[in-house]
């Protein structure tokens, strides 16, 4: 393999890795979260989060949050939401602080937060520890 071909192959490999991880210098930060949800609010919550409702999707993207997913699960008669997203920006704390100040996000949370039941000792979503990842 000549040097030019090797560099093209390396460039292609790096480009594909950047596509998977956000940036070669800023790897993806994976965030998992959990919170309870009031059973009587599940239908309304699902409607708010339906694909047809733009909600705050653009704000999530604006602040470098991708593959944002929420799952519902009943455990011992109680309902829980499990959330996951990948953060690809360079300033997680700063981006989250800016998102918290967005007027539309503030209004969104005023609707969604009362539907949720934080875990004991928490104010809202509780971040979970990532203990495994299979790239």
Image (cartoon, rainbow, N blue to C red):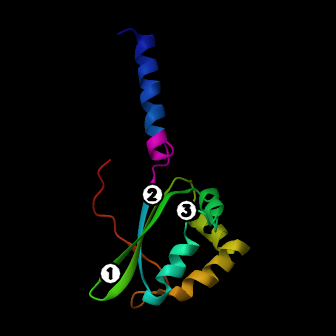
Q: CA distance from mark 1 to mark 2?
A: 27 Å
The mark that comes first in sequence, 1 or 2, is 2
Task: Please tell me how many numbered marks the rendered image carries.
Answer: 3
Residue at the image point whose x is 62% and y is 66% from the top? 53
Disc 3 on helix, strand or loop? helix
Q: CA distance from mark 2 to mark 3?
A: 9 Å
Q: For the N terminus, which image quadrant? A: top left
Q: Residue 105, percent across and down?
A: 66, 73
Q: Is residue 36 above or below residue 67?
A: below
Residue 23 inside the magenta-drawn segment: yes
Quarter residue 117 falls in = bottom left
Q: Is residue 36 above or below residue 95?
A: below
Residue under label 2, please give it: 29
Residue at the image point whose x is 44% and y is 19% from the top? 7
Residue under label 1, please give it: 74
Q: CA distance from mark 1 to mark 3?
A: 31 Å
Q: Nearer the viewer, residue 39 or 27?
A: 39
- Magenta segment, which residues? 19-28
Q: Nearer the viewer, mark 1 or mark 3?
A: 1
Q: Is residue 135 left or right of residue 103?
A: left
Q: Nearer the viewer, mark 1 or mark 2?
A: 1
Q: Nearer the viewer, residue 97 or 86?
A: 86
Q: Residues within 10 Å of mark 3 (few under 14, many from 20)?
A: some
Q: Nearer the viewer, residue 83 or 127?
A: 83
Disc 2 on helix, strand or loop? strand
């Amino acid at each position: 393999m000549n040097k030019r071909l090797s560099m093209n192959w390396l460039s292609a490999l790096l480009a594909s890795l950047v596509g998977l991880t956000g940036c070669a210098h800023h790897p993806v930060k994976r965030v998992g979260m959990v919170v309870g949800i009031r059973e009587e609010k599940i239908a309304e919550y699902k409607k708010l989060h339906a694909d047809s409702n733009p909600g705050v999707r653009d704000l999530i993207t604006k602040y470098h949050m991708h593959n944002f997913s929420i799952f519902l699960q009943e455990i011992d008669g109680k309902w829980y939401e499990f959330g996951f997203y990948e953060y690809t920006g360079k300033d997680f704390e700063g981006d989250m602080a800016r998102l918290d100040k967005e007027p539309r996000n503030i209004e969104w949370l005023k609707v969604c937060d009362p539907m949720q039941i934080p875990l004991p000792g928490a104010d809202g979503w509780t971040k979970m520890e990532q203990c495994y990842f299979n790239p």
